Amino acid sequence: MAHYVTSKGALVALTKAMARELGGREITVNAVAPGLTVGPSAENIPATRHELYRTNRVIAREQRPDDVTGIVAFLLGSESSYLTGQLIVVDGGFVLH
């Protein structure tokens, strides 16, 4: 797990550093951290892990790709033009546990 946790932390740090470096050009940099999402890449994950995620989310259903794409669409639009350097966790409240 050390390599996984380290890489996640590095992405957050890189997001903040890039936001600081590019902000003067009015370029925003944000990161999206999705939870376990239903789709082809999740098929190899054991059912017990799916159940763990489902039962420990505040929103107790499977996460779908469109749960994440809405956030990405928001970040691409003008409504998010003053949002930068943020990690947006889209996991149905899993991290709240």
Image (cartoon, rainbow, N blue to C red):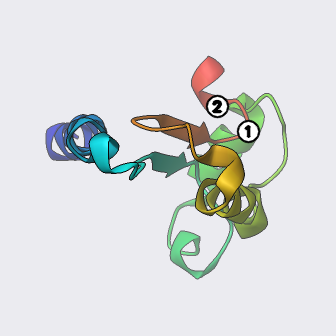
For the N terminus, the quadrant is top left
Cβ–Cβ below 8 Å for labels 2 and 1? yes
Q: Residue at x 54, y 37 (%)?
A: 83
Q: In terms of secondary structure, where does tag 1 sit?
A: loop
Query: Does residue 75 appear left or right of residue 56 in this picture?
Result: left
**Residue bearing mark 1:** 92
Q: Residue at x 40, y 48 (%)?
A: 26
Disc on res. 94: 2
Q: Report x, y in % for residue 33.
A: 49, 47
Query: Does residue 36 appear left or right of residue 92 in this picture?
Result: left
Q: Residue at x 68, y 67 (%)?
A: 38
- The relative height of residue 79 versus residue 92 in the rendered view (above or below) is below
Evaluate whether residue 97 shows in this view: no
- The relative height of residue 20 versus residue 35 in the rendered view (above or below) is above
For the C terminus, the quadrant is top right
Evaluate whether residue 57 shows in this view: yes
Residue type, label 2? Phe
Instruction: Give the spatial CA distance, label 2 vs label 1.
Output: 6 Å
